[in-house]
């Protein structure tokens, strides 16, 4: 979520500031007020989580690292599309809702990348010891994004006016940065604070509101682009993850936890009161707060697996349930935005609900899984292929279908013009039909 008013909070008057009050004499060393400068013994070689470089000081450059030297590399990335939230950069939601995937490869000439962390020892050792190394490797690839008050629809962190802020992830070393659509809002330009402390003007290249994703660009080469976990390396519930971002304006904050759920369906309201469904999001118990929106969720090797997007909370703060759009999906949208300035979304042309046990019994289905078609939109691929209300879709391209959300995810993995084979039950008979996907209006 973007965090309005990124300035560090004032510590308030110290005891004894009021002339009408007398404070007792302090015992022992005086307590330094916030923010604290680094210790006098600190030098630039003392870096990494837990070191003095992690202290907060103006300008807020916590966890500062120099970018690794540039090298010529070839980067392969899966394609996909994304969402996350906040005025400090985290979207607070009260419900759940739907998502998609693809793959692609592009080449960058002179580029720098965050290192992949090698884990020695068994899984227990990795889970215990990997977080500091991951934080040190990935922090340079995570930025803070400030949206000026005149550009932002969000207020300050205390509910008043002021700048809004969120986080971002360096996607390409030639200046392209991933973040959330709800972080940049309607802004056309924002400010980006690198882990080095440099503040750069950035242009908003394009957005993908359906997936709450945006891409901004700074005029800087040789940035440490984040590594992305390949889609073929499946995520596992219980594996260690690390979230990095700027919650409440505290740059380079690192929290850790596990993947506590997969393939969650996330439903979030937009500014018009409508709802957007993002399927197949990642659930994590790593602390995510306002300002984390657009930041990185990485695995134990420092590879991007998601863009932190939303939290489920009654208080507005972290309560142990956060959500991230899968990295593959974010990459797919980012590639399209960089190439053409917008994202093309496929459209099947139906609305439906999950199969219930009662429906399964009525239609003598072998399993109570699938999607029941409630309506078919005119002039779409589904209508032209003859799909009808009441059809029960049980498979896509031969792969069994469990829920309506899974059908949405399968469609979003594809592009307008692609053809899919739907297997469905009508009047007790199983049928197949090929549907050409149209394009969702922008």
Image (cartoon, rainbow, N blue to C red):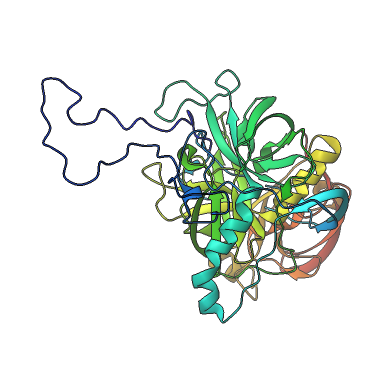
Task: Give whichever of 315, 201 is nearer the camera.
Answer: 201
Q: Residue furthest top?
A: 150
Q: Position of residue 135 (x, y in %)?
A: 56, 57
Q: Position of residue 365 (x, y in %)?
A: 65, 72
Identify the residue at image location x=42%, y=49%: 318
Task: Give whichever of 383, 236 is nearer the camera.
Answer: 236
Rendering quarter of residue 14: top left
297 lies left or right of 421: left
Task: Give whichever of 350, 327 is nearer the camera.
Answer: 327
Identify the residue at image location x=81%, y=50%: 111
Rendering quarter of residue 229: bottom right
Quarter of the image for the C terminus: give it. top right
Residue 383 makes an appearance in the image: yes
Q: Position of residue 325 (x, y in %)?
A: 63, 51
Identify the residue at image location x=81%, y=43%: 336
Rendering quarter of residue 117: bottom right
Count of labels shown?
0
Residue 356 makes an appearance in the image: no
Q: Is residue 22 above or below residue 403?
A: above
12 lies left or right of 48: left
Q: Residue furthest bottom?
A: 122
Q: Position of residue 134 (x, y in %)?
A: 59, 61
Task: Give whichever of 353, 70 is nearer the camera.
Answer: 70
Q: Residue furthest front?
A: 41
């Amino acid at each position: 979520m973007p965090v309005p008013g990124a300035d560090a909070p004032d510590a308030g008057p110290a005891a004894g500031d009021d002339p009408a009050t007398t404070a007792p004499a302090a015992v022992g060393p005086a307590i330094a007020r916030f923010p604290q400068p680094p210790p006098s013994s600190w030098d630039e070689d003392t870096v990494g989580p837990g070191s003095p470089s992690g202290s907060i000081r103006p300008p807020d450059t916590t966890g500062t690292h120099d970018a690794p030297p540039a090298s010529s590399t070839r980067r392969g990335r899966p394609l996909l599309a994304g969402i996350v939230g906040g005025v400090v950069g985290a979207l607070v939601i009260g419900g759940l809702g739907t998502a998609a995937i693809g793959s692609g490869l592009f080449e960058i000439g002179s580029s720098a990348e965050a290192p992949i962390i090698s884990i020695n020892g068994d899984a227990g050792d990795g889970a215990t010891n990997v977080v500091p190394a991951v934080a040190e490797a990935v922090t340079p690839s995570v930025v803070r994004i400030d949206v000026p008050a005149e550009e932002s629809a969000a207020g300050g962190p205390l509910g008043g006016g002021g700048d809004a802020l969120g986080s971002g992830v360096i996607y390409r070393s030639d200046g392209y940065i991933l973040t959330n659509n709800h972080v940049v809002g309607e802004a056309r330009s924002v400010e980006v604070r690198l882990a080095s402390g440099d503040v750069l003007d950035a242009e908003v290249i394009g957005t993908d509101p359906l997936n709450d994703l945006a891409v901004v660009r700074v005029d800087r080469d040789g940035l440490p682009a984040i590594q992305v976990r390949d889609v073929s390396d499946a995520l596992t519930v219980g594996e260690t993850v690390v979230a990095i971002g700027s919650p409440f304006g505290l740059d380079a904050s690192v929290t850790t936890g596990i993947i506590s759920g997969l393939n969650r369906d996330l439903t979030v309201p937009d500014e018009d009161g409508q709802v957007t469904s993002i399927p197949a999001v990642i659930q994590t118990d790593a602390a995510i707060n306002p300002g984390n929106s657009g930041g990185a969720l990485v695995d134990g090797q420092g590879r991007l697996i998601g863009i932190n997007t939303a939290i489920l909370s009654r208080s507005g703060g972290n309560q142990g349930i956060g959500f991230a759009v899968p990295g593959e999906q974010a990459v797919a949208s980012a590639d399209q935005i960089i190439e053409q300035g917008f994202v093309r979304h496929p459209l099947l042309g139906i609305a439906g609900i999950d199969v219930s046990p009662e429906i399964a019994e009525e239609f003598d289905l072998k399993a109570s899984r699938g999607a029941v078609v409630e309506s078919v939109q005119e002039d779409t691929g589904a209508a032209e292929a003859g799909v009808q209300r009441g059809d029960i879709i049980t498979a896509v391209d031969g792969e069994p279908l469990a829920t309506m959300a899974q059908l949405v995810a399968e469609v979003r993995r594809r592009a307008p013009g692609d053809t899919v084979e739907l297997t469905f039950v009508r009047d007790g008979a199983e049928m197949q039909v090929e549907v050409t996907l149209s394009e969702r209006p922008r």
